[in-house]
Amino acid sequence: MRQVIIYPGEDGYWVVECPSLPGCISQGKTKEEALTNIKEAIELYIEVCQEKGQLLPEDPFEIMVVAV
């Protein structure tokens, strides 16, 4: 399981990133589409790492919400 961050982009699309996989980022017109797209991107990222014999980065992040 990987944690992702989702936020509205400047162009009206939703941007979603997987911080534990450098460069693994996607977007979608809706949150649902963006999440579907990042799941596919994560799967492909992992597949390529495995094909190349590379170790997968850990997912050491904790998520906290801070009210300011």
Image (tube, rainbow, N blue to C red):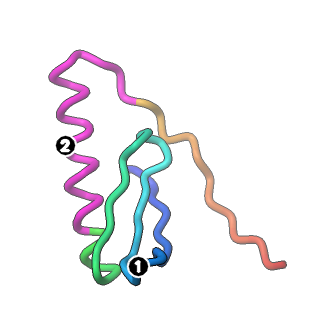
Local secondary structure at mark 1: loop
Magenta-colored stretch includes residue 45 = yes
Q: Which numbered dot is residue 11?
A: 1
Local secondary structure at mark 2: helix
Q: Which numbered dot is residue 44?
A: 2
Give the extent of the magenta segment: 36-56
**What residue is shown at x 18% (from left), y 34% (from top)?**
47
Q: Total number of numbered labels? A: 2
Residue extending farthest to the front is 11
Q: Position of residue 41 (x, y in %)?
A: 24, 51
Asked if residue 64 is positioned above or below residue 30 in the image, the reply reads above
Q: Which quadrant of the structure image shows residue 50?
A: top left
Q: Is residue 2 left or right of residue 30?
A: right
- Count neighbours of disc 1 (C-alpha within 10 A) and say few if under 14, some if 14 to 19, many if 20 or more: few
Callout 2–callout 1 Cβ contact below 8 Å: no
Magenta-colored stretch includes residue 15 = no
Q: CA distance from mark 2 to mark 1?
A: 25 Å
Q: Is residue 28 left or right of residue 19?
A: left
Q: Indicate the amino acid at tag 2.
A: Leu
Q: Position of residue 24 (x, y in %)?
A: 36, 47
**What residue is shown at x 31% (from left), y 83% (from top)?**
30
Q: Indicate the amino acid at tag 1.
A: Asp
**What residue is shown at x 49% (from left), y 41% (from top)?**
59
